[in-house]
Image: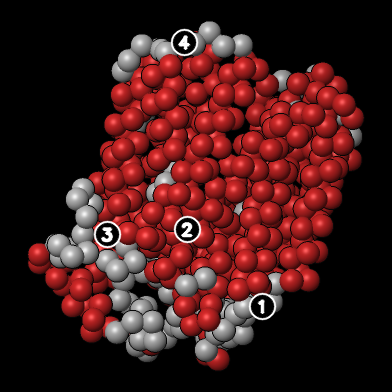
Amino acid sequence: MNNRHSATTPASGAKSTSSTYLWLVFALLIGLMMSNYLSRQVVTVLFPFLKADWSLSDTQLGSLVSMAALTAGLFSLPISLLVDRYGRVLGVTLMAVLWGLATLLCALAGNYLLLLAAHVLLGVAQAAFGGAGGAILLGLFPARQHSTVMGSFLAAALVGSVFSIVLGGILATHYGWRMAFSVFGVVALLMALLFRLVAREPQAAASGTAGAVSAEKLPLRQAFGALFAAPTAVYVYLGCGLQMFTVGASLAWVPSYLNRYHGLQPADAGVKAGIFVLVSAVGMTLGGALVDRLARQAPARKLRITAIYTGLTMLLFVGAFAIAPGTLQLWLIGLGMLVSGAHSGPSTAIVTEVNDPRLRATVLAVVALAVSLLGMAPGPFVTGLIADHSDLNTAMLLMPVASLLAGLCFLAANRHYAKDALRFQAPAESSIAALEEEFLQVELHGDSDKSDKPGL
């Protein structure tokens, strides 16, 4: 089969879909992503209440978060493969219903083991949502908006995390910790119902509709091999994971840093840290929008701009933690947080562009797995380990080295992008010959003066 002609273009699908429907589905998926993190993160703010009621140890409390994350990681790939094969809208609906019920089970738990079991179920339910939701959006929106859309979708996770801590704390303080779980569980079920009523499962790709689950399904062995067939994809997987090492470490340790070096009380440090998280969410959206705008006529710029984001992250964080605590340091930390997640939208858009459209949800699951194994899991731990052997300021100063490595991965991916980007390019979206010529010119001479701008 000729891969270039085996997939339809997202642009063609978007043209045949009403703008109202497009943005309504987008809004519902943003809401579901926020609901996902409301249910996932609320337990962290409930730790003091659970400890007081059941006399739990810190190890038991921490295991509630770890077990949900572990099961989500273990089940992300197999569930994503099922979603790609049997329906993304159906998959998202079932997952939202299941995590809503699991959250309600948390509210009904009578002891620690039942609460732990409910959290394991929560992890299974949420395992493939990011990939399935992202695949739906990539299928609906034209390619020129992919970085913006994915950046906004992923940023909703950070916004949901902040709301979870704020709203969960308020509900638990005034009505008890069970009420926090109950409210967030009902929210998930209502969002699932709305999504099911509005969203439509795209027709099979053979009928010419973009973003669909293909009538021709890849054998499992071939599907797994395809995930790593494009060198661009492999380097982007690594780059995403390494950049999230910096993001994960900063999110985990900035509150403690503000407490130790700026003399803020834990509550005040938590508020400022929450602001930094929201700044990072804004950066995810703006970073994707900027790439979409600057690379619209020059696709070869996408990975170079993404690498610039990681380089700026390193410079800003190194500059911040190399100076004495003060106002300037806070501004540099804030700017570092702003650009630290800006790679998210472009990188996820690119990695799906160079893979088979039939595997979009699975590809995004691989990205999530890389983020977990290379970034969010080791980042806080390694930073804490360095802090134990020196001090937290030294650990935070060394933390951004991961961003430098991420930038090198994105630049390495850029060397293969010209070839890999054409593997599944639909002729209806752009002339293959024209694209080949453009990438060839970029490889030989760089961007033309007409399309390039200084510094990019």
Callout 2 crowding tier (Cα within 10 Å): few <14, some 14–19, many ≥20? many
Q: Nearer the viewer, mark 1 or mark 2?
A: 2
* 274 relative to 209, above or below: above
Looking at the picture, which amino acid does disc 1 mark?
A: Glu
Query: For residue 278, what is the image quadrant?
Result: top right
Query: For residue 290, what is the image quadrant?
Result: bottom left
Q: Residue at point 15% right, 62% down?
A: 449
Q: Residue at point 71% right, 43% down?
A: 38
Q: Which residue is mark 3?
A: 301
Asked which secondary structure carries label 1, the reply is: loop
Callout 3 crowding tier (Cα within 10 Å): few <14, some 14–19, many ≥20? many
Q: CA distance from mark 1 to mark 2?
A: 23 Å
Which colour style is shown?
A: secondary structure
Residue 334, percent from left and from top: 45, 30
Nearest to the observer: residue 115 or residue 285: 285
**In the image, 159: left or right of 447?**
right
Judged from this view, the residue extending furthest toward the bottom is 207
Looking at the picture, which amino acid does disc 4 mark?
A: Tyr
**In the image, 321: left or right of 268?**
left
Q: CA distance from mark 4 to mark 3?
A: 40 Å
Judged from this view, the residue extending furthest toward the front is 450
Q: Which mark is residue 261?
A: 4
Q: Residue at point 66% right, 32% down?
A: 63
Q: Which residue is mark 2?
A: 148
Asked which secondary structure carries label 3, the reply is: helix
Q: Earlier in the sequence, mark 3 or mark 2?
A: 2
Q: Earlier in the sequence, mark 4 or mark 1?
A: 1
Q: Which residue is mark 1?
A: 201
